[in-house]
């Protein structure tokens, strides 16, 4: 995103050494180095020089703990408009979904662009440098295609550029209300009719410097079994990421067994959907055979703990999945919270509640899920690491806030995961360019105001 050579001096830098998806989820190390100088050119790190106790002349100084940029592997940008408004009264995932549909019905290209720009700016303030946008609102109300059939997807891509972050647009096939049933009135905006029409429209999308195009299967409910291979084949042909909501609800598992005599994971395996470029989102209600199929195929798992608890989904078997070989990533999903430190912390704490034992992941392993492995799940394998040749994406945490003050600097990974929040982010650098400086967004000056205005426009 920048061609200007720069030098950064990092007061403290975290270098993670966790091998990706190898062995136990408990393995992995960490290295916190004081006084690290980075040379950056053409948006990439060109040199890493540790053991520099003083900043070189002309270097930009990053006080605090600097980590690789974070990857939010699962986002529905328009869900941000639901924050707080869906917390009144009781209900289930299915009652929440009706409120979400009503919000989706009010989206226009302009209002979606404004909301997404503000949401992505909020992500940058939280240290997120890349987002995976699981995009399924494609058409006008009633299902009529816009003159530009990808105008809503393009609005998201442009919003990410204006907010200063990268995006993988996971264009989503959503064709059915459930196992062959036609879409409901609200779902007509989502449907292309069949997977071939989805692929034709999706093929018109173009990648650019800050944007990659991937694919998604909304769920086994929403894509008929005989059309799953079409979506998977489109992604395979382009070597693009492929994501899918998987077993988020027990009702989905029950309906799949009734329709096909197998679990959703087994259905995806039969139709060639699982594999190293595929990521299952949530993976909550799985059998032992499901876990073995996901891990054995190298399929990733994106956990979204703050959404999963907000919607009362349940606690997924993340540790068992990683132990079987499934790389973990993290997402903020419905944006009840946008804070990947909280997502990482919640994954460990959820497992503690479930097992009544502590220490299922090292802090380094959790940070890697939030950075390198999240970027890999979105097709940005050259991001999420502080090393020569990697993209110059950095996030710096204050070590002197009321949350982070006190621990030894050598415990920086533990401080980041178990003490810090998004409010402790001081700097976010994407491609060598400051997008957040001293806690303020450099491209969207008033992010709270932009969010309030965008949400109000949807309610008008």
Image (cartoon, grey):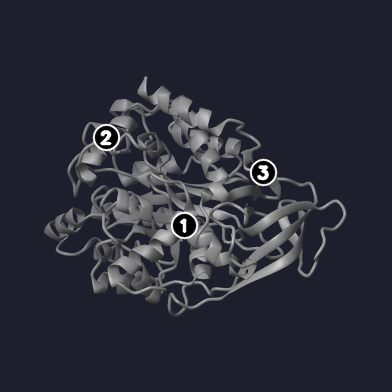
Mark number, residue 297: none
Q: Nearer the viewer, residue 91 or 376?
A: 91
User: Under tag 1, what secondary structure?
Assistant: helix
Tag 3 residue: 438
Residue 233's quadrant in the figure?
Answer: bottom left
Image quarter (top left, top right, bottom left or bottom right) of the C terminus: top left
Q: Is residue 249 left or right of residue 319?
A: left
Residue 26's quadrant in the figure?
Answer: bottom left
Q: Is residue 351 above or below residue 108?
A: below
Mark number, residue 99: 2
- Which-is-in-front pick, marks 3 and 1? 3
Counting residues from the N terminus, which is met first, the one under dot 2 or under dot 3? 2
User: Under tag 2, what secondary structure?
Assistant: helix
Q: CA distance from mark 1 to mark 2?
A: 37 Å
In this rendering, does residue 369 appear at all?
Answer: yes
Point 41% across, 38% down: residue: 80
- Which-is-in-front pick, marks 1 and 2? 2
In this rendering, does residue 397 appear at all?
Answer: no
Q: Is residue 114 above or below residue 421?
A: above
- Crowd around label 3: few <14 · some 14–19 · many ≥20 (10 Å): some
Q: Nearer the viewer, residue 127 or 77?
A: 127
User: Under tag 3, what secondary structure?
Assistant: loop
Residue 194: x and y, percent?
29, 43
2 and 3 marks in contact (CB < 8 Å): no
Tag 1 residue: 237
Image quarter (top left, top right, bottom left or bottom right) of the N terminus: top right
Counting residues from the N terminus, which is met first, the one under dot 3 or under dot 1? 1
Q: CA distance from mark 2 to mark 3?
A: 37 Å
- Which-is-in-front pick, marks 2 and 3? 3
């Amino acid at each position: 995103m920048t061609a200007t050579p720069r030098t950064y001096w990092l007061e403290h830098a975290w270098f993670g050494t966790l091998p990706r998806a190898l062995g136990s989820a408990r393995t992995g190390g960490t290295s916190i180095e004081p006084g690290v100088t980075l040379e950056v050119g053409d948006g990439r790190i060109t040199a890493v020089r540790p053991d520099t106790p003083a900043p070189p002349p002309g270097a930009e100084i990053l006080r605090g703990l600097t980590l690789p940029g974070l990857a939010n592997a699962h986002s529905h940008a328009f869900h941000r408009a639901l924050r707080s408004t869906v917390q009144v009264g009781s209900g289930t995932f299915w009652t929440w979904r009706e409120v979400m549909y009503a919000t989706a019905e009010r989206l226009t290209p302009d209002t979606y662009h404004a909301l997404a720009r503000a949401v992505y700016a909020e992500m940058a303030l939280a240290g997120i440098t890349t987002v995976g946008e699981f995009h399924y609102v494609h058409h006008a109300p009633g299902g009529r295609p816009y003159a530009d059939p990808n105008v809503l997807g393009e609005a998201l891509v442009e919003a990410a550029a204006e907010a200063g972050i990268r995006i993988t647009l996971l264009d989503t096939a959503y064709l059915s209300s459930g196992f062959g049933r036609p879409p409901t009135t609200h779902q007509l905006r989502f449907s292309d009719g069949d997977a071939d029409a989805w692929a034709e429209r999706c093929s018109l999308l173009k990648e650019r410097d800050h944007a990659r195009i991937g694919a998604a299967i909304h769920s086994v409910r929403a894509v008929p079994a005989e059309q799953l291979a079409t979506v998977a084949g489109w992604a395979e042909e382009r070597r693009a990421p492929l994501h899918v909501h998987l077993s988020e609800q027990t009702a989905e598992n029950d309906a799949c067994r009734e329709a096909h005599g197998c679990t959703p994971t087994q259905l995806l395996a039969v139709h060639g959907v699982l594999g190293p470029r595929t990521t299952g989102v949530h993976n909550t209600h799985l059998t032992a055979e499901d876990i073995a199929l996901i891990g054995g195929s190298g399929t990733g798992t994106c956990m979204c703990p703050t959404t999963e608890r907000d919607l009362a989904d349940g606690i997924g078997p993340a540790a068992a999945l990683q132990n079987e070989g499934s790389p973990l990533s993290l997402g903020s999903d419905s944006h009840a919270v946008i804070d990947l430190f909280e997502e990482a912390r919640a994954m460990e704490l959820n497992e503690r509640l479930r097992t009544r034992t502590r220490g299922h992941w090292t802090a380094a392993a959790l940070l890697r899920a939030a950075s390198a492995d999240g970027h890999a799940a979105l097709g940005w394998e050259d991001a999420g690491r502080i090393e020569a040749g990697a993209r110059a994406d950095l996030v710096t945490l204050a070590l002197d806030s009321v949350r982070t003050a006190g621990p030894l600097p050598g415990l920086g990974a533990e401080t980041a995961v178990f003490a810090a929040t998004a409010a402790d982010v001081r700097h976010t650098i994407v491609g060598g360019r400051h997008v957040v400086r001293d806690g303020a967004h450099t491209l969207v000056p008033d992010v709270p105001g932009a969010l309030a205005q965008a949400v109000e426009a949807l309610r008008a």
